[in-house]
Amino acid sequence: MSFGARLSVVLGLLVVAVGLAVWGVVGFILPTPATVDFTSAQPSGAPVNLTVQTVGTIGFGAHPTWVSYLVKSPGGQWIHTTIWKVPAHTRINLTIEQFDSGSPLRNQQWGQVAGTLGGVETLNGNPISVYDSNSGNGVGHTFSIPTLGISVPLVGVPSTANNICSQAPCSAKTSVVNIIKASFMTPGPGDYPWQCFVPCGLGFLYGNGGPMSTLGYMGGFLDVVA
Ligand SMILES: [Cu+2]
């Protein structure tokens, strides 16, 4: 190997080492959203009630204009995080308060309810197994856990409503809302990523940057424990 070749190998390895160091330090410094623990919220084996909300603009924090999920703690407090600890092999009764408007889906597949008990969600009390996003108010977000085959489309509120919430936490008493409910069973222990599949990151490339790619907004983890 010539001196030049050896030099470029060394320089190449140096670049990789520096890159890994920067990646590690940045990852360490970046804040991680808190975990809300639902494992002791009810007697062992009993269903867990998990209530979340979606809002078009969260109205506070580092990115007040971003779209986001929030979760209601077992104590009844709204918390801005997307990491939820739940017990394994347990029925989760999910309630999603959807305060955001919607639009026709780029991929109609995401109008399909999947992986829930009975293969349905209820939209303001009416069971549906699929939603045609080209009708009505379209779909704003999905709650999807790809590794579990679960997906719940969140039908949008009318974009013409004059009481659309723009400051979280939102209240169904004062803002237009769609209440979506679905139940599913948790699998064995593990960290299961969940996310929204509607490119709702307004102002970002193809709608997939910003809140769509930042933990704590349109994606998180279901931390399933034994
Ligand atoms: Cu979304």
Image (cartoon, rainbow, N blue to C red):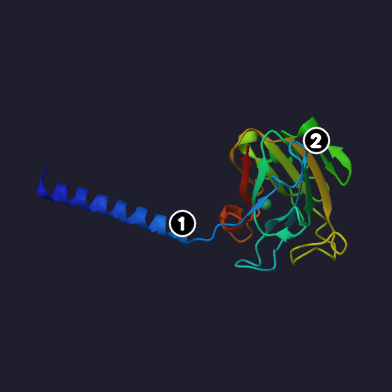
Question: Is residue 196 visible in the rendered structure shown here?
Answer: no
**Residue that appears at 75% across and 60% down:** 77
Q: Say above or below: 105 vs 177.
A: above
Query: Foreground: 167 or 102?
Result: 167
Disc 2 residue crowd, few under 14, some 14–19, many 20+, Cα 10 Å: many
Residue 61: x and y in percent read 63, 68
Residue 195: x and y in percent read 63, 46
**In the rendered image, which residue does mark 1 sit on?**
27
Residue 179 badge:
none
Q: Secondary structure at mark 2?
A: loop
Q: Say above or below: 44 vs 176.
A: above
Left or right for 154, reference 148: right
Q: Label 2 to label 1, Cα distance in Å? A: 38 Å
Q: Say above or below: 200 vs 112.
A: below
User: Hey, which residue is sitting farthest top in the picture?
Assistant: 118
Report the amino acid beneath label 1. Answer: Gly
Query: Foreground: 20 or 203?
Result: 20
Q: Say above or below: 191 vs 209.
A: above
Residue 109: x and y in percent read 69, 37
Q: Secondary structure at mark 1?
A: helix
Left or right for 36, reference 98: left
Report the amino acid beneath label 2. Answer: Val
> Which quadrant does the C terminus fall into?
top right
Residue 1: x and y in percent read 11, 42
Q: Earlier in the sequence, mark 2 or mark 1?
A: 1
Question: Is residue 111 visible in the rendered structure shown here?
Answer: yes
Residue 120 badge:
2
Disc 1 residue crowd, few under 14, some 14–19, many 20+, Cα 10 Å: few
Kindly check if marks 2 and 1 are in contact, taking CB atoms under 8 A apart as contact.
Answer: no
